[in-house]
Structures are given as structure tokens and as C-alpha cells.
Image (cartoon, grey):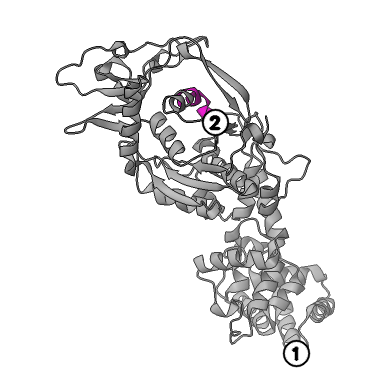
Amino acid sequence: MSDSVQKPSSVRVRFAPSPTGYLHVGGARTALFNWLFARHQGGTMILRIEDTDAERNKPQLVQGILDGLQWLGVNWDEGPFYQSQRTELYVAAAKKCLANGAAFLCYCPAEKYAGGDHAEPGQDEEPKGGGPRRVTRCSCRDGKPSTPGVKPAVRFKVPVGGTTKFPDAVFGEREFSNEEIEDFVLLRSGKNDEEFGQSMYQLGVVVDDIDMRITHVIRGADHISNTPKQVLLYGALGAEPPVFAHVPLILGPDKSRLSKRHGATDVNMYRTEGFLPEAFRNFLALLGWSPGGDEEFLRTKELIDKFSLEGVSRTNAVFDRPKLEWFNTQYLQRLPIEELLPEVENELKRGGLWKPEWAAGATPGPDGRDHAWFSKTVDLLRPRIRLLPDFSSWSRAFFSDEFTRDPAAKEKFWKDPKVPELLAKLADALEKLKEWNHDACDHASRAIAEAGDVKAGLLINATRVAIVGQAVAPPLFDTMVVLGQQRVVRRLRDAVAAFAKV
């Protein structure tokens, strides 16, 4: 079914997380699909925080959700709106349903149904064998007299017989028997001086979607069972339902629901690990959606241009961590260097390695390093970088003179007794060079190796460990050029001094 199920004058979508946990990968993917759809259609994205469940909500988690969305680049146009501040709207809607006969007051004791009026009648009656569910109708729907001292909840009166249908832009026409839909709670019973208590999910989401003029509800397929209840509510409130589009779930490699046992599921953890936001965005977009064809590396503008609900799959997606890492390395290598530099700058700042003179337009430092040097160094390093923290850990020696030499690398490449003498001679030869470039460093190094009657590889490997502390690094002579003549000579002599102390 195409996006044209409904032709609204202006597309309006929403992402509506509950602050009961972190921004889960699945929720982030839902937010991204809404954002891509809104941007493709020239529409509006609303952010709504569904925080009416006072018992489960953790207000401190709201900021983590906002931070995760902002890192991901999913910028909303309106909001965030908080359901906890919109109670009057929900009460008014429930009273409207009471007035038109679509709802009733329920005086049943809390223990009558599992979870009291926090739950829905019939929730504890799912069939064991997978057949139709058996719903217990609440006796209060027939106008049972009020119970003295008992404050009522408000329940929706599901029609007897018939079915509730709705078109789904992903899964096609859906139909549910009304006999399988319980008389669900709209408002909990009040406490103390309250007339009514907390709004339940079904009421709050429909009232908000009507009030916010939502045209398309794009959400996880686990919400399909909620939709017939919401369609009934739209009818009771005299509103036209939006276009529903339920997107497939995200599973772990073992095909079970993605959870912590599969690794990090909090989007902010991937930020901490050092993934590029655009790489993560590209990877996430392809979990349950395809632009058609085999192309995978899609910049954000391309994702927006190509996104449609027609490309959303009905099949659950699998979160593949190696594939995510592949995307990250692709972006590290293929982004225009000026787009990558701000991310590296932020990483070096976190690691305490950043120097202001490396910023664009800044005055070069006393060692001559400037923004051009910074750009050239990042470009040299990025083919070997997997995650952003590699710039401040594995590549530390390029940005700081305070680095350690890997013991395993020293054990492997400094074991030849000729190494100290060769490094000392190389330091002297490099210090005398009139020009500091790749070929000059190459010729000087090979001449020292030949004079010492050793293979050039022995001296090259020993030198790499001496000047950057690692066995694996960018090509040695390119590394020498970006480090600079004085720094290379000094580090070689420091290495020779280290031998003398052994």
C-alpha cells in the first residue's frame, strides 16, 4: 500500500517516547523513520513525551532521550510536549465519551482484573493455544449503580459484535473482531479529591494525535494490537483516524527481540563508543527499509530523497553489529575531510589532546602546527580508524608527545641488538636533512639500513615503534612528515636513551 492512502494538505508525524528507560535502538529507528518521512514530504515532526505513568516514569531519563535524538540528528519541529501537562484534555475527552455513550463508569474493585484498573479486562485471558482471545465484559457497562465510597474509573464501551478495520500503509488492510477487544480503561479512578485519575495510554495518545493534527502514525509493529482500540476512540471522538504505518521489529542475531544480552541497546552508548552519527543513521535507516537496489552507503540527503513507506518491509530486521562497524569505517574513510574534522576535534577535546591552534583560522602554534596540519594528519590516520576514540588512544602519539610504546611491539621489533645503534644513526641523518618530505626520509632511512647491513624493514619497524609507539600505523615516511623533523629526531633519541636504561 502506498503513502497515498490519505492525501493530507500537510504531513504531520510524531515520535512519542515514554521516559521509563533510555532511547532504545528500536525507538531511535522509529524516530528516524518519522523524521525521514516528514523531511521527504516537507512536513512537520512533533516530539511528545508520554509521561503519564507516574509509577514507572523517571524524569531524569528525558534528557537522555533528547540527547540521543540530537546526536542522531533527528531534529523535531514542535515540542517536546509532555502528557503530564495535558491532563485536562484527556479528562474532557473521556467525559465526551461518557456523554455520547461510548464509555461508562466502572466501579469494579481493583482485584477484579489483573493489575486492577491499571490493566485492561481480559488481559489475563490470552488463550494458551493461539486461538481467539476470550474477553470478559465489564458488568458496569450496563449501568450498574455506583458503589458508595468507590471512585469510578472510565472504560470504553467496545461495540458488541462486528469488526474494527483499518488500512495499514505497511501491512495492508487489518481487521479485528470486536469480541476480542476488551472494555479498556480511559481514565483510572481518582484519589483523594480527584474526580478521575491518570489517563491511560489509549486515551492520551488518541487525544494528543487529534489535538496535534497528526496525519501519519509511524510506529513499531508491536503496536498493531493497540490500533483497533484507537480507531474506535477516533470514531467516538468524531475524528478521522490518521494513516497508520507499523514498521517491523528489530531482532538480535539469534532472532529474538533485541535486548541487552545482544550488546548495547541504548543509542547513547553508541555515541560513547565513538560511532559517527551519520554512519549510525545510515545503518539504522536500512533496518526494515530499503530504497531499492543494492546501494547501502547513503548520505542523509539521499535517505531523505529516497524514503517512502512503500520501501518499509513487513519482515523483522536483524541488528548486525559487524555491519554497523562497517558503516562506520566507510564514513570515516569517505566523508569529506572537513565534515570529519569536527568529530575528531570533539574526541581530542574529550581526551585532553586538543590544541586551539589546530582550529580553522587560528594562528599556528610554536611548532608550526595549524589547521592544515590537523586536516592532513586526520586524513592520514582515518583509513586505520574504527571508532572515534582511536584518534585519542591508538593515534595519541600524533597529537601529543606524552605517549607510551606498546610492550608487545617493542618485544617484537626491538629485539635485534643492532636496533639502538641504527636508531641513533638515523636520528643524526634525519637531523641533517635540508628538506623534510617523504622521499628524503625514505632515502635517509634506507641508506642507514644498507650501511648497517640490515633489511630496511627491520629499521622501518623499529622506527615506527620509536616515534609512535605502535607496531601498526600509517606508512612510516608519511608519518614522519606529519610529525615533523624535530619531533621525529627527538623521539628517536628518546628511544635510544630507553635502551640505555635497560
Q: Nearer the viewer, residue 275 or 99?
A: 99
* Count of picture labels: 2
Residue 380, percent from left and from top: 71, 68
Image quadrant in which you'd find residue 410: bottom right
Q: What is the chief secondary structure element of the magenta stretch?
A: helix
Report the side of 282 relative to 418 (left or right).
Answer: left
- Residue 301 is at least partly visible in this image: yes
Residue 243, percent from left and from top: 57, 33
Residue at 46% in and 25% down: 235
In this view, the residue farthest toward the left is 149
Q: Nearer the viewer, residue 270 or 404?
A: 270
Q: Earlier in the sequence, mark 2 or mark 1?
A: 2
Label 2 neighbour load within 10 Å: few <14, some 14-19, many 20+:
some
Image quadrant in which you'd find residue 106: top left
SS category of the residue bearing label 1: loop
Mark 2 residue type: Arg
- Residue 158 to residue 443: above or below: above
The residue range painted magenta reads 222-230
Q: Which residue is mark 1?
A: 432
Residue 129, percent from left and from top: 51, 9
Q: Nearer the viewer, residue 26 or 491?
A: 26
Image quadrant in which you'd find residue 158: top left
